[in-house]
Amino acid sequence: MTSFQLHTSGSCAAAQLIVASESGKLFGSVTAADIVEALAAQSGINVDRRKLSLDEPIRELGATEVTVRLHTDVVVTVGVDVIAE
């Protein structure tokens, strides 16, 4: 089983997700919708998935930084760690 964790301002939330192979490839992916859902669960802030800068879904284990454009002048970076359990 694989989960992913969001890191914002030193806090962390984890969401159970999908299965990974021995080589670290995911059988599925972490999408912008998954990240937005976990962000809402962690912080109570609802963000439109189109505000995330995620060119393509995350398909491998590891750390990724995703930018969220909350407003024209407000951009935050969210760390997404996809880890095997």
Image (cartoon, helix red, strand yellow):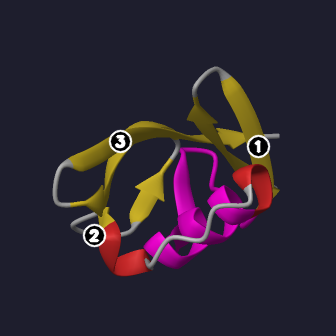
The residue lying at 37 percent from left, 39 percent from top is 77
Q: Secondary structure at mark 1?
A: strand
| Disc 3: which residue | 76
Residue that protrudes farthest toward the left in the picture: 72
10 Å neighbourhood of mark 2: few (<14), some, or many (≥20)?
few
Amino acid bearing label 3: Val
Among the two numbered marks 2 and 3 on one chain, the one whose residue lies closer to the N terminus: 2
The earlier-in-sequence mark between 3 and 1 is: 1
The reply to whether residue 19 is in sight is no
**Residue 22 visible from this viewpoint:** yes
Q: Amino acid at mark 1?
A: Ala
Magenta-highlighted residues: 17-40
| Secondary structure state at the residue bearing disc 2 | loop
In this picture, residue 12 sits left or right of residue 78:
right
Residue receiving disc 2: 56
Number of numbered markers: 3
What residue lies at 64% left-to-right and 20% top-to-bottom?
Answer: 10
- State the residue position of label 1: 13
